[in-house]
Amino acid sequence: MAELRQLHDLLAEGEAALVSLASRSPLAHWLPLSVDQEDGDYHTYIGTALYEQHWRRASRWRTETESRDAVIVALAADLLANEAHALTHTASRDQYARTRAAFQLLKQSATLAPTMPPFVADAVSGAPTVADGGDGMALATISMNLAEDVLAWTSDAPRQLVDITMLPVTQLHDEQMFIRCIQIFEGLYVQVARSLECAIAALEEDDAGEAEAVLRDAAARVEAMPILFRVLTTMPRDAFAVIRDNTHGRSAIQSRSYRQVELLSAPREAGFDPQQAAQRDVADPTLQEVYLKRVERRMTAAQADGLAKVMRRLDLAWRMSKRTHWGVTLKVIGSVPGTGGTSGADYLKHSASISLFPALEADTAMGAASQ
C-alpha cells in the first residue's frame, strides 16, 4: 500500500515517465481507488474516472450509449453472480431475498440498458422465471447460470472494468452489493445527463423529433430505477452504519452526473443546493430555456405538446426516483444526518419536491386553474 501511495503521489506531481504511462493505461485512474480510504470521495470510491475513460473511447453518441449500457449490464451480472455465490454459502431468508432482487434486476436490465446486444437481451429475457418458493439452491443455480452467460457474452473491456472497480473499504458482503448498485446508478445518471445535452443540441438545430426521442429514452431509464432500489432495500441498517463509518460521508448526492441532470434541465437559483458538485457554464442554455424559445419562434403546436409531454414524464420519473431514495434512506438509516453533509432523509424529501422543469409545472398549474 505504501508503494501504491508513492506511485500515486508521483503521478499527481506530474512525473513525466508516469504521465506517459498513464496516457496508455488505466493506471492513473485506478490508483486513487487503491489509496483513498482516508482522503477519497464518492468518485474515487466507485471508480468514476475509470468508467469515464472507458466511455470516452467511444466517438459517437450511439457508440457511447452502447458502451455505457454494456457496462451497466456487466455490473448487474457481476452483482447477481456475487449474490448467488453468497446464497450457496448462506441460505438465509435475507440472502434469498437479495439474490432474488438481483436476479430480477438483471432479468429486467433491458429497461435500464436498452441498447444491449440482441443475443444478451435474448439470454436475459429467456431466463427462467423464479417462483417465490424459497428454494435457495434452485435460485442460486439459475442466477449463476444467467450471470455467467451474460458475462461470457460481454466484451473484455467492460468485464475488466467491472473487475478492477470493486475495492471495498470494509469486509462486509453488503458493501460489495452497495458499490455495484451505486456504480449502476452512476451509469444511469450519465446516460440521462447525456440525453439532456443531446436534446438541447437537437432543439438548437430545430430538430424537435430527435430531442423528443432522446428524452423518451432518458425517461424510460429513470422509470426503471425502482428495480435497482429493490436491491438496495435489502441492506441491513447495522451493516450500512458500518459502511458509513468507514466511507467518511461519501454519497451519491456528490455525483457530478446527478447534479448535471438538474443543472441541464432548467436555470437554478444561486445556491439552490448546498451539495451541488457539478459545474457548468451558466451561459449555456438549459433544456427548459431552449424549449421555451423554440415554442415562441419556430415550433409547431404538435411539436411543443409532444416535447412538453415527454419532459413532464422525465420530471415525474426523476422526482419519483428521489422519493424512492428518500424511502430507502428512512428504512436503512432512519432520521439521522445523511452522508455528504446533508440532513439525511429530510434533505431527500425536500429535494424530491423540486421540479426539473418549473416552467412546465407552472403552465400545468395555470391550465388547471383556468379550467
Image (cartoon, rainbow, N blue to C red):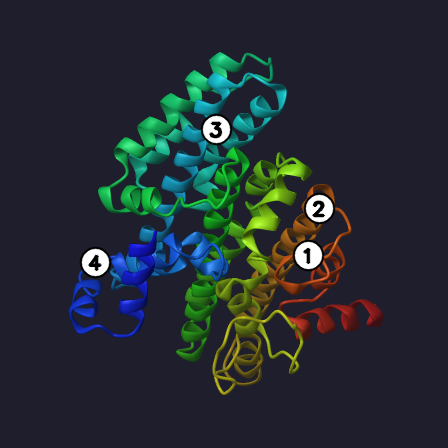
Residue 356, by quadrant, is bottom right
For marks 4 and 3, give the CA distance. Answer: 31 Å
Q: Viewed as shown, does residue 333 lie left or right of 159?
A: right
Q: In this view of the protein, can residue 115 be seen by the observer?
A: no
Task: Name the amino acid type tagged 3.
Answer: Glu
Q: Residue at x 47, y 17 (%)?
A: 88
Kindly identify which residue carries mark 3: 83
Kindly identify which residue carries mark 2: 333
Q: Label 3: few (<14), some or many (≥20) within 10 Å?
A: many
Q: Residue at x 27, y 68 (%)?
A: 10
Q: Label 1: few (<14), some or many (≥20) within 10 Å?
A: many
Element carrying mark 3: helix
Q: Which mark is residue 7?
A: none
Kindly identify which residue carries mark 4: 25
2 or 4: tag closer to the N-terminus: 4
For marks 2 and 3, give the CA distance. Answer: 22 Å
Q: Position of residue 174 (x, y in %)?
A: 54, 36
Task: Name the amino acid type tagged 4.
Answer: Ser
Is the Cβ of the residue at disc 1 closer than 8 Å to that at disc 4?
no
Is the Cβ of the residue at disc 2 closer than 8 Å to that at disc 4?
no
Q: Give the answer, above or below, for where 337 lies relative to 198.
A: above
Element carrying mark 1: loop
For marks 1 and 4, give the CA distance. Answer: 36 Å
Residue 127, by quadrant, is top left
1 or 4: tag closer to the N-terminus: 4
2 or 3: tag closer to the N-terminus: 3
Q: Which mark is residue 338?
A: 1
For marks 1 and 3, give the CA distance. Answer: 27 Å
